[in-house]
Amino acid sequence: MGVARDTVVVFRRYFRRSVTSPLLVSVSLIQPVLYLLLFAPLLGSVSGLSHLAPGGAYNWFVPGMMIQIAIFSISSGGWSLISELRSGVLERMWVTPVSRLGLLLGRVLRDIATLVVQAAIIVVAAVPFGLTLRLPGLLIGFALVAVLALLMASVSYAGAMRIRSEDTFGAVVFSATLPLLLLSGVLLPMSLAPRWLQGLSDLNPLLYAVNAERALFAGTIADATVATGFAVIGGLAVLSVALAVREFRQAMV
Amino acid sequence: MVGADLHHEPRKVRQRIGYVGQQGGADHSISGRSELAFQGLLYGMSRPDALRRATELLAAFELDACADRRTETYSGGQRRRLDVALGLVHLPSLLFLDEPTTGLDPQSRARMWEEVRRLRAQGTTVFLTTHYLEEADALCDRLAIVDRGRIVSEGSPEELKREVAGDVVTLVVDGDRAAAARLLSGQRFVRGQEPLDADADSLRVYVDHGRTAMPMIFRVLEGGGMAVRAISMSRPSLDDVFLRRTGRSLRDEAA
């Protein structure tokens, strides 16, 4: 009864649960397209943005967008975990001999799958607007999104185990994601910011994810920016998985 | 515990015990069959085995008709039966049931009692917690009364009821209940008494023989200048055991 087998069992359940909810599926699919349609057209009009990336505004904006949906995904996992905590669903799983790591990773895997699909929709939808695709960079870019999703989901689960109330969780997540998002350079380049703001932004791990993703979309692979992005996000992901597993283990003595 | 060391073999213990929480634990948006099969997988069964076991349990708990519907469409009784079935997927030798009939209608409760009796007949040890003393009386071979986290009384229902030997006389007095209690407390035929929390002027008196005690109670109280407005006699129930052991009535506490 290995961790891998338990992870697959748990993943299948949650994945099936997600795809059998028509509302959830349609919202998850429409959301990324909305970002693209309602915000990206503004970019062309902001002077100084078009020369940021070779190929124009979309090649600059879409990689940032992929990081942004990953940031926003942080609330969803923890939210559903809290409702399962309160309804006894988790308790029922915890009394079984299933591996605690498998219980966590199965859920996280579902979250990663959802996010990768959403990111793919953004990319495909942006092609008609002039996004140019460079294959190796694109694939590595998706790998980075998956690692970021792993980080976000496990932070979300660890936080949810601590907070255990949907209301508080929602408020905490919102007030944490807002500065993280604004200081990541997703919406506007941080090079436009005053120095003190840039200094703050340098402390934001998500900045390195955004920079790496943009480099990858520009076709640069063997680059310090890319390596830094993977190192920062990957390192934090390992830490947060360890933290979430600890929370899972402690909760069910 | 169940033949395994709780500290060194927690996995083995988990494999041998079942647990059904008070809230249940079936996901609303998943069908009963999927939930049962998933629970089997969590216990390490293969997929075909888990599906077979799910079908078995659905039949045993008469859930075939709603097996493939989302559990949010289930009635209270169906949901509770599914909860218990989820705890039995791996054929545990010890099953913990936390208030299995809370919130159920009388018919569903009777069904649940049948299930518990059937499990016991099959050799499963059922550890049941309940707020309903008649439920404990009907289902348990051994029971313990727990008050504020401590076991205050333990034994078979019969043994516990025997502790409250004799009969219980409940009376309603005209006037001060405390004064009536003082008058009766000196009497040799009175084994004990409790004020009844629900009514300010009611009193419960424990006596050996109710029929002979009632006239004596009248005489004592009238001799003390008090009138009895109503009087009744009953055999002791587990409620009386609880009352005597904890000084409180479970019903009052729950209300």
Image (cartoon, rainbow, N blue to C red):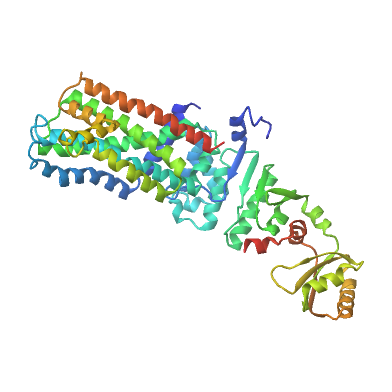
Q: How many marks?
A: 0
Give whichever of A103, A40 is nearer the camera.
Answer: A40
- Closest to the observer: A13 or A58? A58
Question: Residue at 61% of width from left, 52% of height from top?
Answer: B99
Can residue B114 be seen here? The reply is yes
Q: Nearer the viewer, residue B234 or A253?
A: A253
Q: Quadrant of the N terminus of chain B?
A: top right
In this view, B222 is above or below B239? below
Q: Position of residue A56 (x, y in %)?
A: 9, 34
B201 displayed left or right of A221 = right
Q: Position of residue A90 (x, y in %)?
A: 49, 42
Q: Position of residue B210 (x, y in %)?
A: 86, 70
Q: In front: B131, or A162?
A: A162
B235 vs B220, left or right, is: left
What percent of the width, then of the height, locates residue B215? 89, 76
Residue shown at 14%/29% (left/top)?
A: A133
Give the quadrant of the C terminus of chain B: bottom right
Which quadrant would residue A143 be assigned to in this image? Answer: top left
Quarter of the rendering containing residue B209: bottom right
Q: Is residue B143 visible?
A: no
Q: Is residue A133 left or right of residue B77?
A: left
Q: Residue furthest right?
A: B188
